[in-house]
Image (cartoon, rainbow, N blue to C red):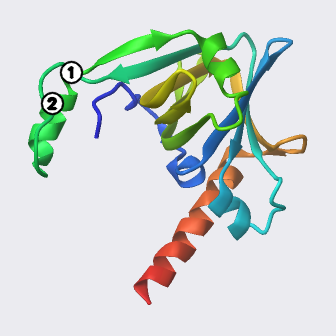
């Protein structure tokens, strides 16, 4: 695991619903930021149409940041020593990426952020969503990136559709993982 500031106090994991999802687009318009995400396994399990996407909306003076993790200059440890890898990855640095450049890069057909981790947490009187994942696209052939969206509120919805309460959004993902575990146990 790459060392990074994802673990936020009082955070709520959105791993069940967003893990292995693909951030496909970012829309910024009229003080609203929308992250459009495809989570194929959750969509399929919930029997949603193949074109269905989820949308995370940041409402109320959103602030946005993107950071790219850069490998340390020290040689990468060989073998499967997790402690050595963790120590090595802690030597890496996070460098800020221009948010507009990142959002624009997602307009390229093959550009995506494969979501690995997702957390929502209070941030003063606001709320923050942090996504960590593997990016591929014009900014980098392959890179670990962290996105942070902070706003007065975050909502979840079907793209172009009704809002989904965060508990229901999490339940969609959890239902898939519960079914996956049950089938793996057979």
Residue that mark 2 sits on: 88
Q: Quadrant of residue 88?
A: top left
Query: Which mark, residue 17?
Result: none
- For the point 68% across and 51% down, the residue is 169
Q: Earlier in the sequence, mark 2 or mark 1?
A: 1
Q: Badge 1 is on which residue?
A: 72
- Which image quadrant for residue 94? top left
Provide residue 52's location: percent of width, then percent of height: 82, 52
Left or right, residue 95 beside residue 102: left
Q: Are marks 2 and 1 in contact (CB under 8 Å)?
A: yes
Residue 126 on image: x %, y %: 61, 18
| Real-space Cα separation, disc 2 to disc 1, in angstroms | 7 Å
Helix or strand or loop: what does disc 1 sit on?
loop
Q: Nearer the viewer, residue 130 or 81?
A: 81
Which of the image's four quarters has the C terminus?
bottom left
Q: Quadrant of residue 29?
A: top right
Q: Dividing the image into 4 quarters, which one contains the N terminus?
A: top left
Q: Position of residue 95 (x, y in %)?
A: 39, 12
Up/down of 48 relative to 14, above or below: below
- Crowding around mark 1 (Cα neighbors within 10 Å: few <14, some 14 to 19, many 20+) is few
Which residue is at the far bottom?
Answer: 186
Is residue 24 toward the left or the right of residue 69 in the image? right
């Amino acid at each position: 695991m790459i060392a990074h500031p994802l673990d936020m106090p009082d955070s709520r994991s959105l791993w069940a619903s967003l893990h292995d999802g693909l951030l496909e687009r970012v829309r910024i318009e009229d003080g609203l930021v929308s992250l459009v995400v495809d989570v194929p396994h959750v969509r399929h399990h919930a029997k949603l149409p193949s074109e269905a996407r989820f949308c995370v909306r940041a409402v109320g003076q959103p602030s946005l940041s993107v950071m790219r993790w850069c490998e340390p200059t020290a040689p990468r440890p060989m073998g499967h020593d997790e402690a050595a890898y963790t120590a090595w990855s802690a030597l890496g640095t996070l460098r800020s990426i221009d948010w507009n450049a990142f959002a624009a890069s997602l307009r390229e057909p093959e550009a995506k952020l494969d979501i690995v981790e997702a957390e929502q947490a209070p941030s003063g009187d606001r709320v923050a969503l942090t996504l960590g994942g593997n990016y591929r696209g014009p900014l980098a052939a392959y890179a670990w990136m962290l996105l942070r969206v902070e706003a007065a509120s975050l909502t979840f919805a079907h793209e172009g559709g009704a809002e989904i309460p965060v508990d229901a959004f999490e339940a969609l993902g959890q239902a898939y993982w519960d079914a996956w575990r049950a089938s793996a146990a057979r």
